[in-house]
């Protein structure tokens, strides 16, 4: 193989590798990665554009189940006394089994929203975060 | 009369275990723990008392090594230790007396003791946590960090599941205890304490009594100075009557002919209890790693991961070098 062909092949491979490593979940939709570790959200403070869909990739690195519920104060007041064992059918209510990753896409109007894990004692332990849409 | 008085003053204290029940309900009373260390072997005895209710309730206990034996503990060892130290305190009040992974967890052993199913597990924090979750344990939010804390030093855990329905069928009454005795060869003995705070919030109190029987007066880390949540409540050469009584209990024929008895009281907040109790009976100081005060050296697995990282960086540099080399003749041609 000639050096020029080899060089082109190597360059193509590097470009393909870089593209696969950096590609968003859905081109054009902003993506926010949230990690759950030791029963805390990382990051716990997030700013997103208001009025456009944003994809949240939530990775639970803990060996216990968690949940990611986002909403206003009334929403959380309802969930604090809720009895649903799991969520999953609504974009703002994500159940996360141990060591699992889930993706959800939400369009938030301008404002401040809180995300909380409402499993017993998890909120008190610090599983709380804030999304500001502006 | 002495026996009656001693029974009345015997306070239930905490076994060194994290107790987990559905919706926070804890139906196992916690009792005292005994750790004897002789000839390089830790004998760990703890008891679970039935407090009524139904269903199953679990407990996780980190261990310093793989037990060679898991048996039903003797019937009176813990009570006899309470009696020894309480009697000494009372006597002292009236005057001095003569004696003062993320792989799966591996199940190593499974033993049924009365209504208690005991499983010895080997694995990292994630693996043990997942095993516990899959087997019905409802772990509190601090469990992932606490399990990692222990697994970094010793990946061995005891999971005990108490079957309250089976206990009823067996005729066990509320307050009846099931002692468990683990025989653990180890060069670096320690007693798990941090696990006592599992599921508690920062200012919750943790109360426990830990009895130690060692060949000589032990050094402890942290030292039980009182300000750190640990208090030395008794420290004296073990009496012959105590040693004889202990030796006559089931599974206790290892008890030596002489020894040192210590009683350490844990009286701490959950946020204060970030350590375990490391013990040394030689001139060497107890291990700060065993006490949980220092992180252990990187396990071999992590070092190999680090080496893989280095290898990747080196490979990338070599590849970039190759690209530059390829570019030189091309540029020269142009």
Image: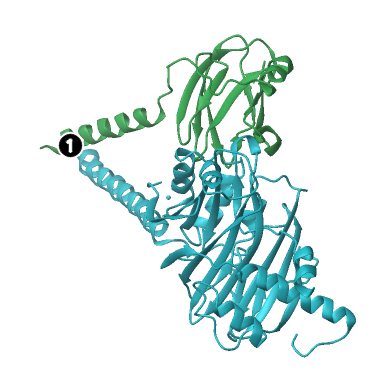
Chain colours: A green, B cyan
Image location (x, y in percent) of residue B55 = 55, 38
Image location (x, y in percent) of residue B163 = 52, 44
Q: Is residue B221 visible?
A: no
Give left or right: position of B142 versus B230.
left
User: The residue marked by circle 1 belongs to what chain?
Assistant: A
**Total number of numbered labels?**
1
The residue where tag 1 is placed is A6
Image location (x, y in percent) of residue A29 = 49, 16
Q: Is residue B229 visible?
A: yes
Q: Is residue B167 above or below residue B223?
A: above
Using the image as rendered, state which of residue B149 and residue B217 is in the foreground: B217
Q: Residue at x 65, y 49 (%)?
A: B174
Q: Which residue is drawn at 40% across and 25% down?
A: A23
Q: Which residue is drawn at 58% across and 45% down?
A: B143
Q: Which residue is drawn at 68% across and 36% down?
A: A126
Q: Which residue lies furthest to the left in this view?
A: A1
């Amino acid at each position: 193989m000639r050096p020029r062909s080899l060089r082109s092949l190597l360059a193509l491979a590097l470009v393909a590798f870089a593209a696969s490593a950096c590609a968003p979940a859905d081109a054009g939709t902003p993506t926010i990665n949230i990690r759950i570790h030791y029963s805390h959200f990382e990051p716990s403070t997030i700013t997103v554009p208001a009025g456009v869909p944003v994809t949240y990739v939530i990775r639970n690195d803990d060996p216990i189940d968690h949940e990611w519920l986002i909403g206003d104060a009334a929403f959380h007041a309802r969930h604090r006394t809720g009895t649903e064992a799991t969520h999953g059918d609504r974009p703002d209510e994500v159940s996360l089994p141990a060591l699992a990753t889930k993706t959800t896409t939400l369009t938030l109007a301008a404002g401040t929203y809180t995300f909380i894990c409402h499993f017993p004692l998890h909120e008190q332990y610090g599983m709380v975060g804030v999304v500001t849409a502006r | 009369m002495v026996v009656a008085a001693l029974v009345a003053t015997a306070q239930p204290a905490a076994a060194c275990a994290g107790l987990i029940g559905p919706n926070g309900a804890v139906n196992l009373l916690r009792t005292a723990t005994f750790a004897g260390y002789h000839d390089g072997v830790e004998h760990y005895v703890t008891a679970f008392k039935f407090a009524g209710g139904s269903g199953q309730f679990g407990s996780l206990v980190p261990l310093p090594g793989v037990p060679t034996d898991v048996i039903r503990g003797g019937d009176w060892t813990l009570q006899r230790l309470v009696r020894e130290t309480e009697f000494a305190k009372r006597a002292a009040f009236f005057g001095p007396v003569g004696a003062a992974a993320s792989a799966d967890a591996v199940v190593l052993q499974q033993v049924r003791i009365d209504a208690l199913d005991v499983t010895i597990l080997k694995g990292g924090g994630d693996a043990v946590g997942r095993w516990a979750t899959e087997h019905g344990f409802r772990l509190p939010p601090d469990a992932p960090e606490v399990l990692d804390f222990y697994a970094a030093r010793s990946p061995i855990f005891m999971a005990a599941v108490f079957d309250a329905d089976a206990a009823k069928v067996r005729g066990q009454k509320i307050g009846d205890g099931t002692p468990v005795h683990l025989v653990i060869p180890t060069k670096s003995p320690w007693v798990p304490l941090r696990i006592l705070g599992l599921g508690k919030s920062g200012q919750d109190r943790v109360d426990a009594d830990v009895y130690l029987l060692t060949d000589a007066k032990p050094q402890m880390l942290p030292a039980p100075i009182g300000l750190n949540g640990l208090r030395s409540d008794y420290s004296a050469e073990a009496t012959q009557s105590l040693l004889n009584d202990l030796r006559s209990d089931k599974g206790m024929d290892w008890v030596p002919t002489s020894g040192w008895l210590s009683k350490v009281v844990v009286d701490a907040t959950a946020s204060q209890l970030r350590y375990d109790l490391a013990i040394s009976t030689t001139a060497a100081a107890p291990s700060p790693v065993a006490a949980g005060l220092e992180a252990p050296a990187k396990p071999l697995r992590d070092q190999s991961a680090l080496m893989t990282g280095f290898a990747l960086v080196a490979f990338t540099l070599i590849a970039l070098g190759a690209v530059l080399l390829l570019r030189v003749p091309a540029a020269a041609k142009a």
